Each structure stands twice: as structure tokens, then as C-alpha cells.
Image (cartoon, rainbow, N blue to C red):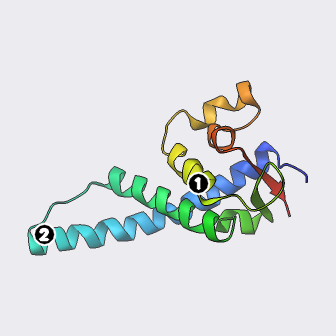
Amino acid sequence: MNTVGIGTRVLNFLTDTAIIFLVTYIANHAWAFYATWYHIFYLGFPYTFGMVIFVYYLFFESIFARTPGKWFTITKVVNKKGGKPSFLQVFIRSLTRLTVIDCFFIPFLDKTLHDYLSSTEVVEV
């Protein structure tokens, strides 16, 4: 089980963020149309972006143990024993990603906060 380095993790992040941004942009514009047409509440782009991030990572990592960014770099998420992470672990990972301080823990923990709190790793396939 070879854990991946920072370069691969950055490539995963950039790929996934580009997809998330595109999905959020489309969803936000659709929601704005319906909010105007039906006179319902409107969530701004940052709230929609946060919800899409959470659902995106929860969906892909709980079902496939990888996101499209991880498919691109041929990596996956595993638990400490090398198996597929539990739904609770993926839920914790997805929830922790919403914090701004997530990546600032790398120098102190040698991993991101979402990996540390959920007891998971990103490894090469």
C-alpha cells in the first residue's frame, strides 16, 4: 500500500474542484431561475458550492472509494487496514473538507485533517 504524495493529492484536488465548480455553476443558475420564477428562497453560490462539495465526495467515496480526480490519478481511499472505508469514515471526510483549515494540518500531521479524523489514507491502486 503506497500512500500518495502531495503532487498527486493536488492533482486530485484540482480535478475534483473543476468538476465541482462546473456542477455548482449549473445548479446555482438553475436554482436562481426557479427562485425567481416561483418566488422561493435563493441560496448564494458559496452555500451551493459547500453543499455540492459535501454531496460529491460523500457519493463518490462511499460508493466507489474514489472520485473522478482519483480515477484520473489511479488512486483510491482506504481505511487503516487497506479496505474500503465505512460510510461513517467517508461522512467524516466529507464533512471535514468543508473547513477552511483542512490543508493547514499537513505540516503537523503529515496528512490532511480529513484523513486524520476519519482514519483513512489515499493510496495508489
Front position in the image: 24 or 117: 117
Who's the residue at 20% across and 60% down the image?
42
Disc 2 secondary structure class? helix
**Disc on res. 88:** 1
* In this view, 110 is above or below 39: above
Q: Which of marks 1 and 2 is nearer the N terminus?
A: 2
Please state if 117 lies on the left or on the right of 74 as rendered.
left
Which corner quadrant of the image does residue 26 belong to? bottom left
Residue that sits furthest to the left in the current view? 39
Q: Which amino acid does label 2 sit on?
A: Thr
Which corner quadrant of the image does residue 91 belong to? bottom right
Q: Mark 2 points at which residue?
A: 36
Who's the residue at 70% across and 58% down the image?
85
Who's the residue at 29% across and 69% down the image?
29
- The crowding category of the residue bearing disc 1, from other C-alpha atoms within 10 Å (few below 14, some 14 to 19, many at least 20), is few
Picture coordinates of residue 77, whole percent (x, y) = 73, 57
Q: Are marks 1 and 2 in contact (CB under 8 Å)?
A: no
